Image (cartoon, rainbow, N blue to C red):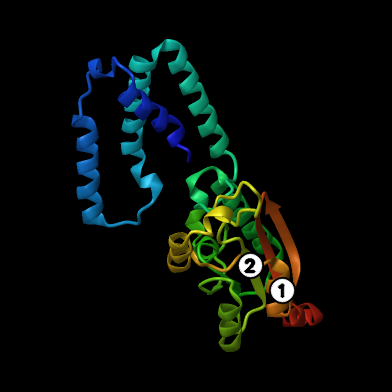
Amino acid sequence: MNLFVLTVPALCVWFFRRGTTQLRTHPGPLVGVCLAYVMTLSWVGGAALARYMLPATSVLIILSIAVLRVGAGIQWWSLAVAVSAAAFAITLNSYPPYHFALDDNLAYCDFIELQADGAHFLQETANSEPVLTAWPATDEFSQTYLGYTNRSLRTLSVPDFEPAALIQTTAKDSFQTAFVFSQRYEPLNTVFRPGRYLRVLAFWKRAQMEFFDQPPNLTPEAAATRLDAEIVWRETRGPLYAAVLEKRAVRDHPQQIR
């Protein structure tokens, strides 16, 4: 999340300013942390997620600040640290103009609160089960120890909310209630969106199609149309949303509700 705001000035000072050669650096901590990461993750496995690198990143931040302090002097060092801290604070609490994982910053709080509010609504008002939804809501609703519900709700799992998955599931399974939500972040197509300009590059288009070519989130209205349902609860936080849908047949015949 904009770590380059700190590392780029530190690299410039390191290569172009005198005095940094006097900085006494000890590569042991950084090398040791990196080796520990390689060995640990090779053994336990795991995805290539930015948060897995936080211990190594903290060592890099300390090294960058030390370089700026020695090579740039107290005045420029203070300015660089202040700008970097401001950039970290802004990106920690905002949605960037590009795709990113929601758990990379405090946007994950919005996601969790939407899930919790939806679980509370279902538990208090919806008696129709199973609830059609996708992970992680399937675990949140069925596993009470996670703290989202006081009682376990029966769920019907779908891999995502794309039309094909919904049609396939509804064709073979019956349900009365659905909980749909934003599974990914979709940035606005503004002038600040980098992908808007990178699309002209052939390698970028190939990489997008191979690794990140995902259809946009299905809106609650579109999901309701696909499922022949009505939206009975909806909440948004920033660009994220969550909604509870109830099939029209159930609303027309309340005696069918279990």
Tag 1 and tag 2, C-beta contact below 8 Å: no
Question: SS class of the residue under badge 2?
Answer: strand
Residue 223 % position (x, y): 68, 73
Labels 1 and 2: the sequence-earlier one? 2
Look at the picture and state if 224 lies above or below 253. Answer: above
Residue located at (54% from left, 68% from top): 134
Look at the picture and state if 257 lies above or below 232. Answer: below
How many other residues sit within 10 Å of disc 1, few (<14), some (14-19) or many (≥20)? many
Look at the picture and state if 145 lies above or below 154. Answer: above
Residue 137 % position (x, y): 54, 63
- In the rendered view of the protein, which quadrant contains the C terminus? bottom right
Residue located at (35% from left, 56% from top): 47
134, 84: nearer the viewer? 84
The residue pinned by badge 1 equals 224
Residue 186: image tag: none
Q: Amino acid at mark 1?
A: Ala
184, 202: nearer the viewer? 202
In this rendering, which labeled residue sits more in front, label 1 or label 2? 1
The residue pinned by badge 2 equals 179
Q: Amino acid at mark 2?
A: Phe
